[in-house]
Amino acid sequence: KAGVTQTPRYLIKTRGQQVTLSCSPISGHRSVSWYQQTPGQGLQFLFEYFSETQRNKGNFPGRFSGRQFSNSRSEMNVSTLELGDSALYLCASSFTRDYGYTFGSGTRLTVV
Amino acid sequence: SQKIEQNSEALNIQEGKTATLTCNYTNYSPAYLQWYRQDPGRGPVFLLLIRENEKEKRKERLKVTFDTTLKQSLFHITASQPADSATYLCALVSSSGTYKYIFGTGTRLKVLA
C-alpha cells in the first residue's frame, strides 16, 4: 500500500512569505501529525489532527497552522516566514495512537 | 520539565557485535515507548513499541527493554551489519493529559565492516 506522501519535497522561500505543505496519509489512517526537525532541536511536535479536528498542539507560534480534510489529507501553513523556520517538516499518520507512526519523507523548507 | 536523553555522541561498533542504545527520561510517565530508525534526508521508520507494563520486546535482531523504575529503555541490535548504520530515535507517549509524543534527539550508529 502507498506510504505517507508529502509534497513538495523541497521548497525555497523568502523571509516574510507564506508556505503551504501537503500530506496524504496512508489509506485508513485518520490521525495525522506534523513535526519540525532541525539539527539542533530534533523532532519538535507541531500538531495532531484526527477526523478533521486538531487534537493536540505543540509550542509553536500562531504563524504555524494546519488543517485536515474529510479524506484525512492534511495541510500545514506557515505565514510570515523567518530564517529560523528552515527545517525538515515531517508528516506522520497512524491508525491509532497505540501504533507507531508512519512518516513521510518530509518537505525540506529553506527560508532565505 | 519533561526531558528525554539519548547519547548524542555517535556509536561505532564492529560488524557482528551487539549495539546497545540508551534512552533515559525524566519528569514523565509514559504509557509506552517507541523506537524509530532514521536515515539521512528521510523520515523516521517505526521499529518497535513497548508498553509500560512490558519489560522486553523482540523483533528479529532487535530487542527493547523498558524499566519504568530506572526511567530507561535500552535498544539492542544483535549481529549488527553495516546496513544498520543510521540514527535511532526513541519516542515516549503519555496516556494522561494531552497524549503527546516526545522524541529524543537520536543516537547515530555506525557499524564498521
Image (spheres, rainbow, N blue to C red):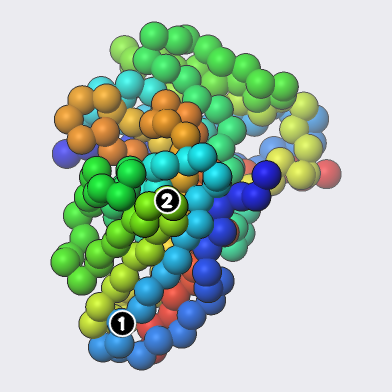
* Amino acid type of the residue that numbered disc 1 sits on in the rendered structure: Gln
* Amino acid type of the residue that numbered disc 2 sits on in the rendered structure: Ser
**Could you tell me if the residues under marks 1 and 2 are in contact, i.e. CB atoms within 8 Å?**
no
Please state if B88 lies on the left or on the right of A59 as rendered. right
Tell me if I can see residue A71 in this picture. Answer: yes
Please state if A68 lies on the left or on the right of A99 as rendered. left
| Rendered image: mark on residue A53 | none
Q: Which residue is mark 2?
A: A72
Q: CA distance from mark 1 to mark 2?
A: 23 Å
Picture coordinates of residue B61, whole percent (x, y):
71, 24
Q: Which residue is mark 1?
A: A18
Few, some or many C-alpha atoms within 10 Å of disc 2 (few <14, some 14-19, many ≥20)? Answer: many
Residue A33, compared with residue B84, is above or below; it is below
Q: Nearer the viewer, residue B71 or A62?
A: A62
Q: Nearer the viewer, residue A110 or B99?
A: B99
Tell me if I can see residue A39 in this picture. Answer: no
Residue A29, compared with residue A61, is above or below; it is above
Few, some or many C-alpha atoms within 10 Å of disc 1 (few <14, some 14-19, many ≥20)? Answer: some
Picture coordinates of residue B18, whole percent (x, y):
69, 26
Residue at left offset 37%, top offset 74%: A20
Question: Which picture quadrant has residue A111?
Answer: bottom left
Residue B51, compared with residue B37, is above or below; it is above
